[in-house]
Structure formats: structure tokens, C-alpha cells
Image: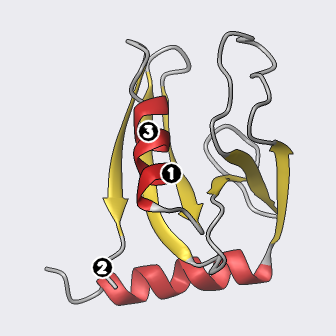
Amino acid sequence: MNQFDQDFWHSLDKLVEEATVIIDRPKGSRHPRYPKLIYPVDYGYLQGTSSMDGGGIDVWRGTKAAQTVDAIICTLDLLKKDSEIKILFGCSAEEKSIVYRFHNESEYMKGILIERKM
């Protein structure tokens, strides 16, 4: 069942490499609709892509020198009644854990982290 895993990750690499990463919510900034939510890691999207919410595919950009795709987080939002994937790249183990907790702090949003096996 895992025979296509590497193809998936390579496709994500290609998607990130070919898109412009827009960080519109830098670390420490507040969510525009929920000001109590503070972004713990740089957050943005891939310009020229599309996701369930009509915007670009969301990304979390970490602080590691190697800006490679590390993981994805699949989210379920009970308020919006949608689901999305968010691409994590350049994230340390601590940053991945922070992002995971960020997506699971609310009763309305839950996420599952899928890490890339290197």
C-alpha cells in the first residue's frame, strides 16, 4: 500500500518548488477573524494553487536551513465544515509539534500530522 508514497512526496516537492510561497501571516501575527489566535510559525499559501476554501494551498514554513517538505497536516474544521491539507516545509521537530498542537487546541478544528520518512 505504501508503494506510491515517494511519488506523493516528490509531487509535493515539485508543487512547492514551482509556486511562489506567500507568507501572509508571519510568526507572532494574529488571525484576522480570531485575534486570540497567534501564529506560532510562519503561515501562508502557495500562489497559483487552489484549496477547499478557494484560496491557495496552505503552508507552514519553519526555520530550518533546508527548506524541504517535511510533513503535511490534514485538518477538519467543524465551523467551516471543510477539510484541507497544509504543507509543512523547513520545520524542525519542535515546529511540527507546535503546528500539530495549533490545529488541535480548539474543539472546532482537528488535525492529523503525517511526517515524511526520509
Label 2: which secondary element: loop
Locate residue 28 relative to residue 69 in the image: left or right: right
Which tag, 3 or 2, sits closer to the chain's start? 3
| Residue ID at (21%, 89%) | 3
Of badges 3 and 1, nearer the viewer stands: 1
In the image, residue 61 lies at what x, y percent?
A: 67, 58
Residue 103 seen in this snapshot: no
Of badges 1 and 2, nearer the viewer stands: 1
Which residue is disc 3 drawn over?
Answer: 75
Q: Identify the mark at residue 95; answer none if there is no mark.
A: 1
| Quarter of the figure with the N terminus | bottom left
Quarter location, residue 30: top right
Which tag, 3 or 1, sits closer to the chain's start? 3
Choose between 102 and 80: the one closer to the eye: 102
In the rendered view, how is the structure colored?
A: secondary structure
| Residue ID at (64%, 85%) | 14
Amino acid bearing label 2: Lys
Which residue is disc 2 drawn over?
Answer: 117
Label 3: which secondary element: strand
In the image, residue 50 lies at what x, y percent?
A: 71, 55
Q: Is residue 97 above or below residue 89?
A: above
| Residue ID at (44%, 51%) | 94
Q: Is residue 115 above or below residue 1?
A: above
Which tag, 1 or 2, sits closer to the chain's start? 1
In the image, residue 118 lies at what x, y percent?
A: 34, 85
Say if mark 3 contacts mark 1, CB within 8 Å: no
Amino acid bearing label 3: Thr
In the image, residue 8 lies at what x, y percent?
A: 42, 80
Amino acid bearing label 1: Glu
Of badges 3 and 2, nearer the viewer stands: 2
Q: Is residue 83 above or below residue 3?
A: above
* Disc 2 packing (10 Å; few <14; some 14–19; many ≥20): few
